[in-house]
């Protein structure tokens, strides 16, 4: 069984309105939330083998803080193709994941990430997780899917969890 974790970047800072969107850092709230999500992944033993991260600063910083809380060091790929990507574009990147990866994390942006999560949530998805996903997929939210098969054939999965930082700490 494969495990896919879709993680929206943590809250970014708007302190400098002249910064290009790609170069926005995390806000204080985002720094805290990213660490909290990392601790939650470690506590639940949801440890990735591979990570795909948008190359924007806020996604790279989100992953850096999450990874600091994990006991393992997965293979990380920074992909410019994930910045402002549509759901279909993100899914294309996921389908290229290493076949041996049992757990893949994708750190990206809305609306593409949320759209993908809604598309992937197939039959058998947990009602509570689906409801949370439909309500809101805020910054630092994490959607967990499990499915049988290969990354190259992913089209739906079973949504098991939709975690939001405010619900964790």
Image (cartoon, helix red, strand yellow):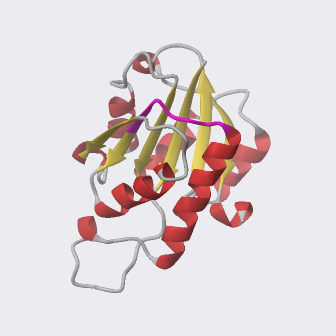
Q: Is residue 149 visible?
A: yes
Question: Residue drawn at (48%, 53%), measured in percent from left and top?
Answer: 68
Measured along the vertical axis of the image, is residue 63 above or below residue 155? below
Q: Nearer the viewer, residue 129 or 60?
A: 60
Q: How many marks?
A: 0
Question: Residue drawn at (41%, 55%), measured in percent from left and top?
Answer: 64
Q: Quadrant of the N terminus?
A: top right
Question: Residue drawn at (59%, 15%), measured in percent from left and top?
Answer: 148
Residue 49 colored in magenta in the image: yes
Measured along the vertical axis of the image, is residue 23 above or below residue 144? below
For residue 34, side relative to residue 57 (left or right): right
Q: Quadrant of the C terminus?
A: bottom right
Q: Is residue 138 visible?
A: no
Q: Which residues are magenta?
A: 45-51
Residue 157 colored in magenta in the image: no
Image coordinates of residue 55 in percent, x first then y, are: 27, 52
For residue 15, side relative to residue 55 (left or right): right
Image coordinates of residue 161 in percent, x first then y, are: 69, 42
For residue 96, side relative to residue 48 (left or right): left
Image coordinates of residue 130 in percent, x first then y, are: 69, 44
Residue furthest top as drawn:
149
Question: Residue drawn at (37%, 21%), measured in percent from left and top?
Answer: 98
Measured along the vertical axis of the image, is residue 167 above or below residue 151? below
User: Which quadrant of the figure has residue 146?
Assistant: top right
Type of secondary structure dominating the magenta stretch: loop
Image coordinates of residue 139 in percent, x first then y, are: 52, 63
């Amino acid at each position: 069984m494969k495990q896919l974790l879709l993680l929206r970047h943590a809250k970014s800072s708007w302190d400098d309105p002249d910064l290009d969107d790609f170069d926005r850092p995390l806000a204080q709230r985002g720094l805290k939330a990213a660490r909290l999500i990392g601790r939650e992944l470690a506590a639940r033993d949801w440890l990735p083998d591979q990570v795909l991260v948008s190359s924007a600063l806020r996604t790279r910083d989100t992953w850096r803080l999450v990874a600091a809380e994990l006991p393992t060091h997965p293979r990380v790929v920074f992909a410019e193709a994930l910045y402002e990507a549509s759901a279909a574009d993100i899914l294309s990147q996921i389908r290229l994941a290493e076949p041996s990866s049992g757990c893949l994390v994708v750190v990206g942006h809305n609306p593409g990430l949320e759209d993908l999560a809604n598309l992937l949530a197939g039959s058998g998805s947990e009602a509570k997780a689906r409801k949370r996903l439909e309500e809101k997929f805020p910054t630092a939210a994490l959607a967990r899917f499990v499915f049988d098969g290969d990354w190259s054939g992913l089209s739906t999965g079973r949504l098991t969890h939709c975690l939001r930082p405010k619900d964790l700490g």
